[in-house]
Image (cartoon, grey):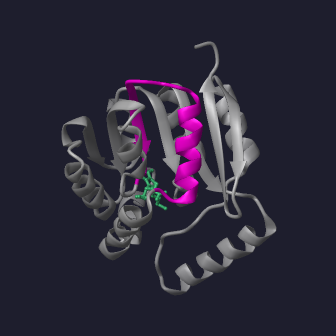
Amino acid sequence: MPCNCCEITDNAFSEAEARAGLRDYRRHGPAEHTRLILEAIRTLKLKNAELLDIGGGIGAIHHELLKDVARQATHVDASSAYLRMAKEETARRGHSARVDFIHADFTQVAPELEKADIVTLDRVVCCYPDFRGLIKAAAEHSKRALAFTYPRETWYLRIAFKVMNFFQGLRRDPFRVFLHPVAEMDLLLKREGFERVSLRRLFVWEMALYQRTGV
Ligand SMILES: C[S@@+](CC[C@H](N)C(=O)[O-])C[C@H]1O[C@@H](n2cnc3c(N)ncnc32)[C@H](O)[C@@H]1O
């Protein structure tokens, strides 16, 4: 990482939080923001695809897409607690041979990784300061589609994020949340050869699906 972000992110997502995330997923299925990504990807009607899930948390996206869209997945995550939960659920589903797990900051290991048909980042850019580096590296690794969720640029989230970061500072915790400019992320993806084909909104999250043009 350009900083010690992997360590910062790793500390930010505790074992208890990851365990609670997995429990929720087992009880209720994918969260609403994740469902937007899954629905968007399924509109592309891909089969036997390779999936690269960046910051996949407990792995909901690959647990779901390995059922009908993907044949193989790579899950890169900076959080060791999330990766442990994701591995546990992957094994429970009998998918261990189909998923590679990498504990790293994606921007650091990206040059060593193969491209995939689909790249996903569900609520990841908001945990990472260098959104340009992250999105560019993600886009370069997508052969066909990239779907991601990020917080909407609204007045209420600007305030909420300022308050959250203020308390993070008081706790002397270096982890911060980021409201990155959507227009810049969009421009960056267009420059990388993608066009936006779907955009959906929840109260906090926005989901955008991009497709590589000319494929
Ligand atoms: C808010 S959690 C979201 C987890 C999951 N995608 C979800 O929506 O439930 C953010 C995740 O992104 C990971 N992350 C953030 N920046 C990353 C980076 N540069 N490389 C790899 N993982 C990253 C964190 O470790 C964490 O697992």
Count of numbered labels shown in the rendering: 0
Residue 69 on image: x %, y %: 42, 31
Of all residues, the one furthest to the right in this rendering is 155
Residue 187, quarter of the rendered image: top right
Q: Is residue 41 magenta?
A: yes
Screen quadrant of the C terminus: top right
Residue at 20% x, 50% y is 91
User: Against 59, is 44 above or below?
Assistant: above
Identify which residue, 95 or 51, lies in the foreground: 95
Residue 115 on image: x %, y %: 41, 26
Residue 168 on image: x %, y %: 53, 79
Residue at 35% x, 69% y is 23
Residue 11, quarter of the rendered image: bottom left
Residue 130 visible:
no
Q: Is residue 119 magenta?
A: no
User: Against 200, is 163 above or below?
Assistant: below
Residue 101 on image: x %, y %: 27, 45
* Left or right: where 189 falls relative to 27: right
User: Against 93, is 26 above or below?
Assistant: below
Residue at 72% x, 43% y is 184
**What's drawn in magenta, residue-wise?**
30-56
Identify which residue, 10 or 169, lies in the foreground: 10
Q: Quadrant of ligand 1?
A: bottom left
Identify which residue, 141 or 144, lies in the foreground: 144
* Left or right: where 132 falls relative to 72: right
